[in-house]
Amino acid sequence: KAGVTQTPRYLIKTRGQQVTLSCSPISGHRSVSWYQQTPGQGLQFLFEYFSETQRNKGNFPGRFSGRQFSNSRSEMNVSTLELGDSALYLCASSLARGTGELFFGEGSRLTVL
Amino acid sequence: AQSVTQPDIHITVSEGASLELRCNYSYGATPYLFWYVQSPGQGLQLLLKYFSGDTLVQGIKGFEAEFKRSQSSFNLRKPSVHWSYSAEYLCAVWVPTGANNLFFGTGTRLTVIP
């Protein structure tokens, strides 16, 4: 069974640009969550999608958005990039909501110059 | 507010030594508890979880963790470590309130010297 797949793995952008990251969950998993990981802040929850609807959202500005498609694949978008957005963005999927048992992808490493 | 504390930022042990990584949480009730491991440049792999029942739980790779309600702790243990276990270990709790359901500690970086 394939794991959670995130693309791209690495990318470099400049301030002011926007970026879209993609996540394909484990087959059969309908919940997808996104986390931002930085050395200073650790892992911080961005949002969770289930059945194409955003169910939870963390404390991030509106520049961070996401969506989920009917096949459970998810994308997140960051507009007007800032230097502080440089981070590892991790996607996680779960079979059911409300358990915390998440299966993570390898992440997308974003560097903003 | 809910919080997870991993008091040890970095631990170094020799190969073959035993290991205990500490995790304390702050929450009014018993949350669901997890330990994840993250190798450099990789995502997180679930080591073990505690939902309820037996307070000593077994996980993958021979890891175990013990939930102690009186101490609000969920410490991870391994009788003997291999150099390949060098990685970041993250404790997490899930609580059924608010938007951020899964709270992570800041992690403990483990270095195993061959």
Image (tube, rainbow, N blue to C red):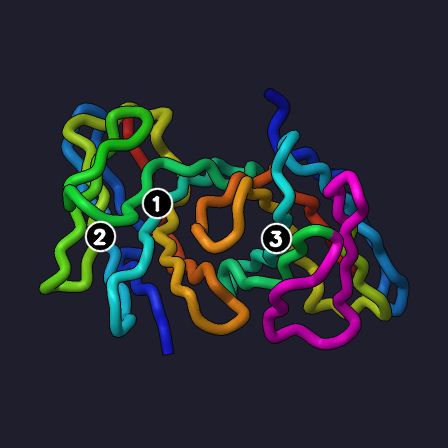
- In front: B32, or A18? B32
Residue lying furthest right: A17
Classify residue A77 by image quadrant: bottom right
User: Where does the image place residue B21, in percent across and percent down from the top left?
Assistant: 23, 47
A78 left or right of B52 in image: right
Q: Which residue is mark 3?
A: A33
Amino acid type at image mark 1:
Trp
Q: To which residue does mark 1 refer?
A: B35
Crowding around mark 2 (Cα neighbors within 10 Å: few <14, some 14 to 19, many 20+) is: many
Image coordinates for residue B68, horizontal then vertical, percent: 13, 55
Residue A44 lies, in percent from the top left, at 54, 63
- The three-letter code of the residue at mark 2 reads Phe
In this view, the residue in front, A31 or B26, is: A31
Q: Which residue is mark 2?
A: B74
Local secondary structure at mark 3: strand
On the same chain, marks 1 and 2? The answer is: yes
Q: Which residue is found at the position 77% from the left and 64% from the top?
A: A65
| Magenta region | A52-74
Q: Chain of mark 1?
A: B
- Check if residue A23 falls in the magenta segment: no
Q: Callout 3, which amino acid?
A: Ser
Location of the N terminus of chain B (image quadrant):
bottom left
Q: Quadrant of residue B5?
A: bottom left
Question: Left or right of A26: which side holds A64?
Answer: right
C-alpha distance separating marks 1 and 3: 18 Å
A93 w.r.t. A67: above or below: above
Disc 1 versus disc 2: distance between alpha carbons? 9 Å
